[in-house]
Amino acid sequence: MDPFADTLWRLRETFRSGRTKGAEFRVSQLEALGRFLQEKKTLLQEALAKDLGKSPLESDIMEIIICQNEITLAIKNLPSWMKDEHVSTNLFTKLNSSFIRKEPLGLVLIISPWNYPIQLTLLPLVGALAAGNCVVLKPSEQSQSMEKVLAEVLPQYLDQNCFAVVRAGPQETQQLLENKFDHIFFTGSPHVGKLIMAAAAKHLTPVTLELGGKNPCYVDDDCDPQTVANRVVFFRYLNAGQTCVALDYVLCSRETQERLLPAMQSAITQFYGEDPKASPDLGRIINQKHFKRLQGLLRCGRVAIGGQSDETTLYIAPTVLVDVQETEPVMQEEIFGPILPLVTVRGLDEAVDFITRREKPLALYTFSNNSQVVDQMLAWTSSGSFAGNEGFTFLTLPSLPFGGVGQSGMGRYHGKFSFDTFSHFRTCMIAYPGLEKLHELRYPPYSQRKKNL
Ligand code: NAD
């Protein structure tokens, strides 16, 4: 017996009825989602604090406001996004109307991770609703408090004939995936991404995979160490390092490493105080399992800054490791925690070589006062996103696509890119029913007279 059959049947029937297709209905759902974020803000902040120790301000900026902005953008632009796109024609099709219609795909499944449990669940939802789909949402079971809010409160705001939240761990999600969907949007690890893609293949369901990996950060000798340290520390330790686009390791020369270390210590003290454990602005590790995994990584190389941890509060200090070997686990797996290894290289060429010998990352960062160094890194490498002298601020701009390449994922979203991801671009050509004399030219028999034309 499939426990999801009734829900999926209900949503499919609604989609078949055409209810979700009109702009008015889509806007009503987006507005309802906006009301949910507004009216339940405190509840959402509390859930984020419980699951991840996120401060209310960080929750607002990185989770709630980003979704509210996306909703506002989608509502404002929906008429133009939905509009048929008329295309140029050739001599033979001049009299026809040729255009692209953006159609909803049908019933879509969104599976999200625990690290930004609002943003990574609701941003794709905005795109799916704006595009007129029915949606099944599968939030992560690991961010338990947020899963509960999304499952119990969010459906009260949305039309339950078009939208459902499923609470499921890995095993139940596999069962859910035995069903046919019209698109699966997955955010999570590359390992599970492969399982999702394999399950989707059985139904020829297209997938968007937003995955993770190790994001390199090259720091050039020509830099102001304190400026770089401030930015690196901020973007590495935000959300206790549990960010898919966080810089995972730094490549720099030994001389730059020696200049960076005191600057990073100073930035950590300035941001989180003498005792970062007491800072309300430093998040906590999601659970015991990840805490233990990260404790293992602390044994790699040599601790230059931080290194303290407390299992009872799932606290790990902002940590910098040096003298790590490429073969150690901290350089083999995605860190996804407040630990940053520094790896020494002899300059840009060696850094490029180090990066391009590995899987294409989700994001790549370069810090240098010399714009040529930034340009060369951009030209010689590939990654989902690239930032020069900055962290992952790019993801706040809905005018930029967000997604991976190669091992870090496939497909893109944010802003109109989300709408397009959840739409089918239907090719349409409508001809006059008359003017048959003109059409006769193309029919056989292909006489000499026709060939001479
Ligand atoms: P995960 O892959 O373990 O889980 C993601 C989702 O998949 C969860 O909802 C989970 O319940 C489900 N899942 C887990 N095992 C499953 C299975 N066997 N079958 C079906 N579904 C299963 O990832 P996570 O630990 O929640 O998140 C961390 C990972 O996600 C990191 O690799 C990180 O880089 C990546 N991530 C990527 C992005 C991005 O935008 N590219 C954003 C956040 C996180």
Image (cartoon, rainbow, N blue to C red):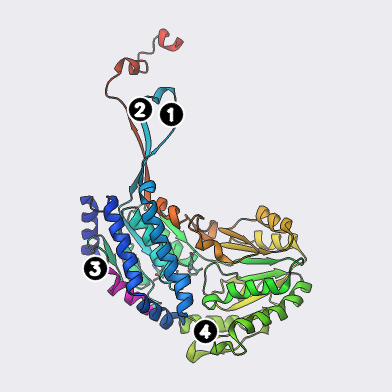
* Residue 441: quarter of image: top left
Who comes first in sequence, dot 1 or dot 2? 1
- The magenta stretch is 144-156
Alpha-carbon span between mark 3 and mark 2: 49 Å
Residue type at mark 1: give it.
Answer: Thr
Is 36 positioned to the left or the right of 311 in the image? left
Tell me the SS state at disc 4.
Answer: helix
* Residue receiving disc 3: 3
The quadrant in which the C terminus is found is: top left
* Residue receiving disc 1: 89
Query: Is residue 161 or residue 408 the one in the foreground?
Result: 161
| Residue 206 showing in the rendered view | no
The reply to whether discs 1 and 3 touch (Cβ–Cβ < 8 Å) is no
Alpha-carbon span between mark 4 and mark 3: 34 Å
Tell me the SS state at disc 1.
Answer: loop
Assess disc 1: are there few (<14), some (14-19) or many (≥20) residues with their C-alpha within 10 Å of its C-alpha: few
Verify whether residue 121 appears in magenta.
no
Residue 96: x %, y % from top left: 35, 27
Seen at 39% across and 81% down, the residue is 46
Is 190 positioned to the left or the right of 324 in the image? left
Who comes first in sequence, dot 4 or dot 1? 1
Examine the residues drawn in magenta and state their main secondary structure.
helix
The reply to whether discs 1 and 2 touch (Cβ–Cβ < 8 Å) is yes
Residue 64: x %, y % from top left: 42, 70
Residue type at mark 2: give it.
Answer: Asn
Tell me the SS state at disc 3.
Answer: loop
Residue 292: assigned label:
4
Seen at 24% across and 56% down, the residue is 12
- Of the residues tagged 4 and 1, which is closer to the observer? 1
Residue type at mark 4: give it.
Answer: Lys
Tell me the SS state at disc 2.
Answer: loop
Alpha-carbon span between mark 1 and mark 2: 8 Å
